[in-house]
Image (spheres, rainbow, N blue to C red):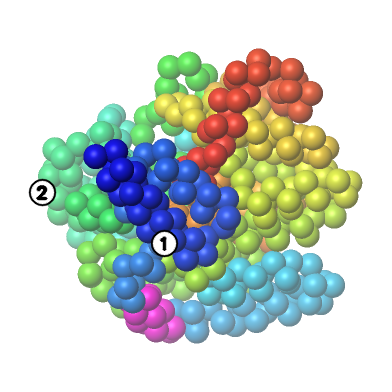
Amino acid sequence: MTTILSVAFAGYLVVTVTYIISENRRPSATFAWMLLFFVLPGLGVVVYLLFGRKHQDFGQTGNLMRQELADRLNPVFAALAPEHERAVARMDANGGSGRTLAQLVYNTSHSTITTRNEVRILHDAKEAYPPLIEDMKAARQSIHLQYFSWNTDALADELYEILSAKAAEGVDVRIIYDPVGSLFMLKRRLIRKMRAAGIRMEPFSKLWRVHTISYRNHRKIAVFDGVVGHTGGLNIGCEHIRPPEGFETWRDTNIRVVGSAATLLQAVFAVDWHNATGEDLFRPENFSPAPDRLADAHLPVQMTLSGPDSEWQAIRQLYFAMITSARKRVYMQSPFFILDTSISEALKAAALSGVDVRVMISERGTNQHVPYWAANTYMEEIAASGASVLLYEPGYMHAKTVITDGVVCSVGSANIDIRSFSINYELNAVIYDAGLSEQLERAFLEDSRHCRAFTAEEYRSRNAALRFRDSVARLFSPLM
């Protein structure tokens, strides 16, 4: 019996290891999966089937759908083409500032540069929720909301009252939520109540589709009448206003856009709604032009997207380009800090080149520990290169921002971690504006007053057992 089990185990390892090597993943991810197959025989395969398979493994249907939807959106992007061309011409006239980054976003996300915009940066839920609610109340044609997590609490009750009243007025109200992100938070009774009021509230994917359960829609989008939009890091829940026990604050960053950039958000929502429900929202009446008062405005904004079915890991490449293009400084905020090789090397190279690199992350999680253990090992490497690693102490740092040289910034849903770069559906707004970039920089510096520095020397002096725990957690970081 022992011999039979040994032969079966050897055969199992040969098959699984051969398969995972043939996928040509990053070596770190390949070895992580091989280790999991060895340590958890059988169970490791189940975990892989649920969380590890590439989107392309499920056939060409998704690719064909994306092509079809891209064709349907051609008229929308054609209408924005003059703005894109003007923005490129101005960037070239200004010595090419932002031109390379804009071209990268255009090629990886097929996103044009929009210019007829006004943008307002909103820090934390107490700043972000009131204008969101005001825009809901002001909507006359459509309300489109998409959030990773939607809680059943007092805020949800308030939104229900507003949304049900708007639906009764004849406004089309549609909501996408992520079923895993909202698991144990969004109650069926609230969904039934929404639907009974004429509100279309649908999951991005079905939980019973276990083979794609790891591919979460982490985007945060709100679009009103196709011309006003919100995006950033905030979800829907009172925990953003009244943080969980042990946290004084919930630090986040959102933006409110009016104008052509909202058209891009509407397009993203329309694609995700079609994928979730099959309903066609690509009719011209769903895409409104920018208000006349913005006819002469010039505030360049692009939306960059990534997901498991993307041809390129667009947001990872965005972050890489923003770091490597920095000449003076690059400031980054994220709740998580799980690096792949490219981002790790970019940060270290920038710091060693004399660029002022500062990374601010949450000191701890609200309900997770392992990612923060693994993050310690990455923070040690980055800090040793001369970068400043700042741990936000008073609360939970949930903002996802990057600012380069005070001239270009990114605000969105993507964390600095491998899951956001390659597994989740994410969206970031890239803003080519010194005024808004400097505003974000000032907020970063204010946040720095509430941080403590993480140093490589301090970490290396910690208990050896704790550092070994962190190193073990790091082994599985490609799977987090």
Look at the magenta stretch and give its main secondary structure.
helix
Question: Which residue corresponds to mark 2?
Answer: 196
Q: Nearer the viewer, residue 244 or 435?
A: 244
**Residue drawn at x 79%, y 67% as measured from the top left:** 97
**Residue drawn at x 69%, y 17% as measured from the top left:** 462
- Residue 153 in which image quadrant: top left
Q: Label 2 is placed on what type of residue?
A: Ala
Q: Secondary structure at mark 1?
A: helix
Residue 227 visible here: no
Q: Are marks 1 and 2 in contact (CB under 8 Å)?
A: no
Image coordinates of residue 214 in percent, x first then y, are 36, 50
Which portion, as a residue range, is magenta?
63-75
Q: From the viewer's perspective, tell me whether residue 378 is left or right of residue 66.
A: right
Q: From the viewer's perspective, tell me whether residue 179 is left or right of residue 376.
A: left
The N terminus sits in image quarter: top left
When the figure is inspected, residue 446 is found, relative to residue 150, above or below; the finding is above
Image coordinates of residue 26 in percent, x first then y, are 57, 57
Q: From the viewer's perspective, tell me whether residue 294 is left or right of residue 455.
A: left
Q: Secondary structure at mark 2?
A: helix
Question: Which residue corresponds to mark 1?
Answer: 19
**Residue drawn at x 57%, y 50% as measured from the top left:** 28
Disc nearest the viewer among 1 and 2: 1
Q: From the viewer's perspective, tell me whether residue 152 is left or right of residue 56.
A: left
When the figure is inspected, residue 462 is found, relative to residue 44, above or below; the finding is above
When the figure is inspected, residue 334 is found, relative to residue 29, above or below; the finding is above
